[in-house]
Amino acid sequence: MTRINFKKIESKWQQKWRAAKIFRVTEDKKKKKYYILEMFPYPSGSGLHMGHARNYLIGDCIARFKRMCGFNVLYPMGYDSFGLPAENAAIKAKINPKDYTEKSVSNFIKQQKSLGLSYDWSRLIATHKPSFYRWDQWIFLKMFERGLAFRKRAPVNWCPKCNTALANEQVHSGKCWRHADTGVEIKYLEQWFFKITDYAEELYDNIEKLKGWSEDIRAMQRNWIGKSHGIMIDFKIDGKVWPIFTTRPDTIYGVTFMVISAQHPELTKLVTKDKKVEVEQFLKKIKSTSEKELEILEKEGVFTGSYAVNPLTNEKVPIYAGNFVVAEYGSGMVMAVPAHDQRDFEFAKKYDIKIKIVIQNADKSLTVENMERSYTDEGTLVNSGEFDGMNSKVAIEKISDYIEKQEFGKRTTQYKLKDWLISRQRYWGTPIPIVYCEKCGIVPVPEKKLPVVLPDKVKFGEGNPLETNKNFVNTKCPKCKGKARRETDTMDTFVNSSWYFLRYCDPQNDKKIFDKDKVAYWMPIDQYIGGKEHACMHLIYFRFYTKFLRDIGLLNFDEPTLNLFNQGMLHGSDGAVMSKSRGNVVLPEEISQKYGIDTARLFLLFVASPDRDVEWSDKGIVGCHRFANRLYGMVRKNLKKMSFKKCSENLGLKDKFLLAKTYDTVNSVASNIEKFQLNVALGDMMRLVDAVEERLEDGIDKNVLGEIVKNLILVLSPFAPHVCEELWSKIGNKSFISLEEWPKIDEKKIDRKILELDKLFEKILEDLNHIIKIAGKKKNAYLYFVTDKEFDYFNESKKIVEERFGFKVHAYKVSDAKKYDPQNKASKAKYGKPGIFLD
Ligand code: ANZ
Ligand code: ZN
Ligand code: ZN
């Protein structure tokens, strides 16, 4: 077997690609564009492992395919290079985060280049560069102008390990998203927020449009944004109006108490003198606001001493402070109906509060005494004044109508989504372009003074690092030129990933964030690829940014991408997700040393459907290595036996079959790539190589063999580009296969009849295998009897059987009068099911 010198081929072609700049693109109105993008990586110091590699290879394979299909393909790469891990790692290693990051970035680039990824490297971006984050700051200013960036004192989620506040999206089940073992605490801080809630409605409604996203992620976003139709009902507390949000106005006659959120900023106003100590003690006990945790937490509360008046009944009910009410949802206070809401029920039981049934079930069997849990189903209203006897579903509308008519309240839609807290008390992020002046207050840094550059010299471990650089902190007020201080918080790094895909369209622009026309040409992203874990973080934020930038006139579309593919995870051989911290990583370098990068590429794409999780195994890689070598050897060895002229019309059955199979493979590979079934596509190509190899000794028509080889390496090239470039030149081409056109095969050219015969034949081989296993001992000869229609094909293919099983084969037509058939097997033969006789 001719062994491939993978290393030599790889570096040769990578160099040629680079020198000829073949993956660079510019806008070309005459060509259809295709923008394909993988979520850009955080360049971790430990480098890129096979798990990362798999993601990029999926994208690269499709990018290469689309390029061959004639699209003008934008396929860029960059680095999400700001962030806490780099800061922490740098502190640990006692070096500057910038040096640390830049080393990691160049290592990543080197590794990615060695994979043969077809990025347009001239568009490279890194978010920690002032030339990039300057535009983060610019967007901040635009939001500030429109009141969408604002500062407020608020209870925030604080991770004691990260030493910073977190956004809501970064709290997962009450824990920090980076620290699954660290509970989030509540701190009251002055923080910067982005008013993403202004876009809640559109973010929610447009989920409908995201046809190419998985239903999983769409459902997660719907849940996260959380749309509820209901009504705000005005209760009165000490004569002052308190609107209360409810989705169940049909239960209003059953309200027996109220609960205000323990985190509500106005809670203290409701606490009477004699209840002060008790309430304070209770508040100390509660630490977390995380909603997920609240669902499982025991419902607890304390009486505030105040009462609220129900506008419909004029009843006075006690107000409790409770741990299960969210401060920032509705108005942060609920009307509690213990008979019909489970949380209220548990609370009432615990604190011995009255329960009043206002919705009766069909058999009228509900009593307060026999109730073991709340009754939340539909029913008939009771104890509800003039609404008695009404169906509860109907009553929701009727009581809402009444409330609106009496001006006791108004119907409304509420969203669970909260404003995005973007302040971070950490160093390695975009400085917030704001100055605090003693006279003028909060003053934005003027646009022409951007970027506010992150200083190199800070001290770590003494609180907010930027505060330790006096040169940075002390500045002049842009308005009055008086003494002023700079904001020392930096922005959440999710800010960077919210618009980086736009910058790729015009990455070097130093006058504007980007050229509108360029973005209009490339955007939206035609195919985005990334992990599911971003469902309620990055994948919401980038939609929000897109809508905002549209509203300030920079974009002419509503959604960044309609197509999102979520790749599966690569697991190490221990079964756990591949990661440095697990110690189960396999590095691309190791594999390429041993087997070559194309082998690794083939393996990662073949081993499973790209959307599936998969375990790394060396076994699989050996198989792919063999495949690459076999193909390479086959082409090299038979170069003299092929030519590239038009195939004759009068071919033998075998050649006809191979041509049909080749064309069929070309088309199935294309349609499988379109469906992200890259593993299936590879399987098709492998079977074609098998079929060719099995028939080679027998002799294949020169032009047919040429046609097979040419097509095969064309369609394999997105998967194994280096080997295919090499073979492409070996069969006499001067062009890059990477820029060749995908073979266009007219369906009509594919001889389906002959393919069907081959399928039958394959089945017979299987049957034979079976029979021989059962028959046990080795036979010398084997006969089969086939219908006249099949005869020619089967007779020609009998060599394959002989080779595979090592015995002589005779084929007879069923109608053959001279056939040798002692057991009369021919009488049982049917089309596709020959009679078989082992001698
Ligand atoms: C009275 C009532 C009776 C309720 C009943 C439910 C059942 P969604 O669908 O999630 O929007 N609620 C209102 N504000 C809240 C807050 N800040 N924190 C926690 N819960 C709050 O749910 C709306 C319902 O959640 C509202 O309807 C309110 O309780 C509660 F038999 O009002 B309901
Ligand atoms: Zn943390
Ligand atoms: Zn000033």
Image (cartoon, rainbow, N blue to C red):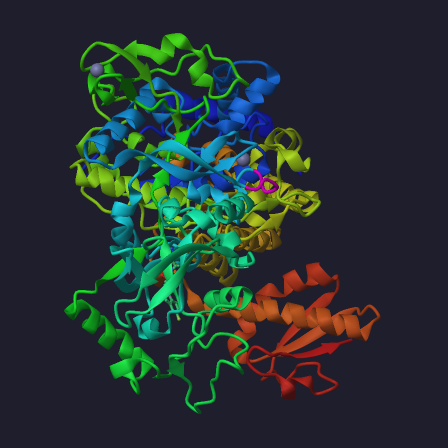
Which residue is painted at 35% across and 73% down in the image? 251
Q: Is residue 742 visible?
A: no
Q: Is residue 66 left or right of residue 616?
A: left
For the image, the number of numbered tags is 0
Between 299 and 712, the residue placed more toward the observer is 299
Name of the residue lying farthest toward the right: 777
Q: Is residue 354 above or below residue 181?
A: below
- Residue 220 picture location, percent across and down: 42, 55
- Residue 814 picture location, percent across and down: 60, 83
Q: Is residue 568 above or below residue 403?
A: above
Residue span colored magenta: 179-183
Q: Is residue 134 found inside the magenta-colored segment of the image?
A: no
Q: Is residue 140 left or right of residue 325?
A: left
Q: Quadrant of ligand 3?
A: top left
Between 449 and 368, the residue placed more toward the observer is 368
Which residue is painted at 47% across and 52% down in the image? 291
Locate the C terminus and report the quarter of the image it occupies: bottom right
Q: Is residue 810 visible?
A: yes
- Residue 190 picture location, percent across and down: 37, 31
Locate the N terminus and report the quarter of the image it occupies: top right
Q: Is residue 766 above or below residue 104?
A: below
